[in-house]
Amino acid sequence: MIAKLVRKPPFWLFVQSLALGVALAALGKFEPVRVFDTTSYEQFRFAPPAESLCQMRTFGYPLLLRLGAVLAPSHAAVPALHFVLHVLAVVVFWMGLKGVIRSDWTRLAVASSLLYSNTLLRYANALAADSLASSLAIATMGWLLLTIFGKPRRVCWWVLALGVFATYQVRPAYLFLIPLFPALALALRWLVTPRAAPRPPWRSLVLSSIAVVLIPFLAFCTVRWVTVGRFSLVSFGGNNFAGVVSVFLTADDVDRLPPDIRPLAKAVVRRRREMAATVPDYSPEITLDYMGIERPWNVNTAHVCVPAAREVYGNDWPEMDRGLWRLALAIVARKPLCYGVWLAKAFVRGVYLIASHYLMNPVYFVLLVAMAGFHAYYVVLRKRSPGDATAADPAFFVEFNALWLIAVGFALSKLLLVIVTSPPLGRFMDAAGVFFACALVRGLVYRIALCRPLMRGVAAPAAAGREGP
């Protein structure tokens, strides 16, 4: 029985998960750590419903904290829940890859790479939504693959809808999944379907994928509009957006803004001056330097823009957030060039963080080194080979490009959504780049496959030479 288990890929996925869990426990990663956002999740009120829809957070992560409180006090069980849910998400993704990757062992290697994601290793013990949201995105991506490449069943589409809904209810920054999934479903079906296969029902695929991601979102926003008068997922984002673009606002701009937001603009300008008088490193001057915008972002958000909005609108959080949104949009309309420069620099910064954080991940660094090593070894063997090498893995083209399409589409969509209102901080970009590891592992497997026949081809003439007269 043990011998049979060892020959099964799921056994090695279980072994890796167990080993990773033991390693994280030994490193203290199952000890909960409070972060800046923890209090706002703890203070979420589920009743009455109208009040829950007025808050600055969605209900997804507060629900997990409630579940953790049932299992253990003081959030002691939450990091373990993060880990278990992440492993389950990887299992779902592994199942989804069956429609894309032929080899069971290659599928295992590709899916296993997600176990070691930066988001899990760095934020699994943080009492914030980052780890859970990333895991839900992995699971939902896996279910998308199951849905479009498995047997067409209506229940699969609605489970996909529930997965997407749960993901952005945990972290609204994943709203990019709504436009991404229909486009990705269409592109993946086109790429993976053999040329000689019957033509897939493209119209049904597009309409189904759009409906399942859009209907729950519109339904929830409608309920919120009827209840609290706001057609949106949550009253949040205006503070982040104003925290970015308020650095472009000067006293001379105030009188040129719409009259109804001038009181808020005046309060922001005044508070920026007061902050500069008390904080030596803080500057109230306009800057286009990227770090000059990112570094004081938390201060501008929490200690300038939000208190200024409270002065004008009182403690009505939805009205405060709405005012900050309108102020931010008015500043962008007034200073579009400044905002355009910010977007360009933030995009470059986000790409840099995704790449650099892969080098900092010990597992992915080893994979990159292995890729370089096997590629160099392949070049040497290819030069020494007596004949022309044939393709070692004819399925590589489709499988690698499908994984690359997922990785690039996911990362680009998340990055573009983030930089509109917020700096591309490390915890945002770690989650954005999560699927690149899959393409990296598939490329490594291909390089190893290329080396094998060449090793036999080079070894055979050498052995013949030794045995000859």
Image (cartoon, rainbow, N blue to C red):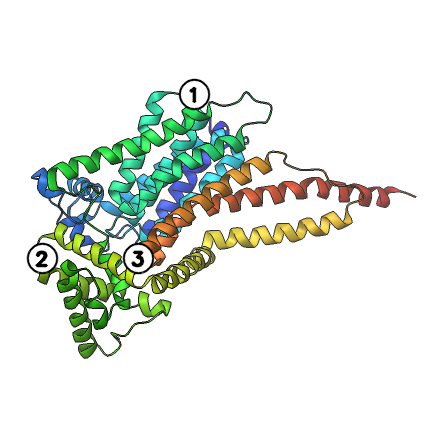
Which residue is at 35% across, 49% downward? 120
Rendering quarter of residue 211: top left
Rendering quarter of residue 268: bottom left
Residue to which mark 2 is pinned:
313
Instruction: Tell me the SS state at disc 1.
Output: loop
The quadrant of the rendering that contains the C terminus is top right
Hey, what amino acid is under mark 3? Ser
Of pointers 2 and 1, the one earlier in the residue sequence: 1
- Give the image location of residue 456, x and y in percent: 73, 40
Residue to which mark 1 is pinned:
151
Q: Estimate the spatial distance between the alpha carbons at disc 2 and disc 1, rounded to whole Å.
A: 53 Å
- Give the image location of residue 329, x and y in percent: 26, 56
Hey, what amino acid is under mark 2? Tyr
Of pointers 2 and 3, the one earlier in the residue sequence: 2
Residue 141 drawn above or below residue 465 = above
Residue to which mark 3 is pinned:
422
Residue 244 makes an appearance in the image: no
Residue 381 drawn above or below residue 159 = below
Of badges 2 and 1, nearer the viewer stands 2
Q: Estimate the spatial distance between the alpha carbons at disc 1 and disc 3, rounded to whole Å.
A: 40 Å
Which residue is at 28% across, 42% downward? 168
Q: Are marks 2 and 1 in contact (CB under 8 Å)?
A: no
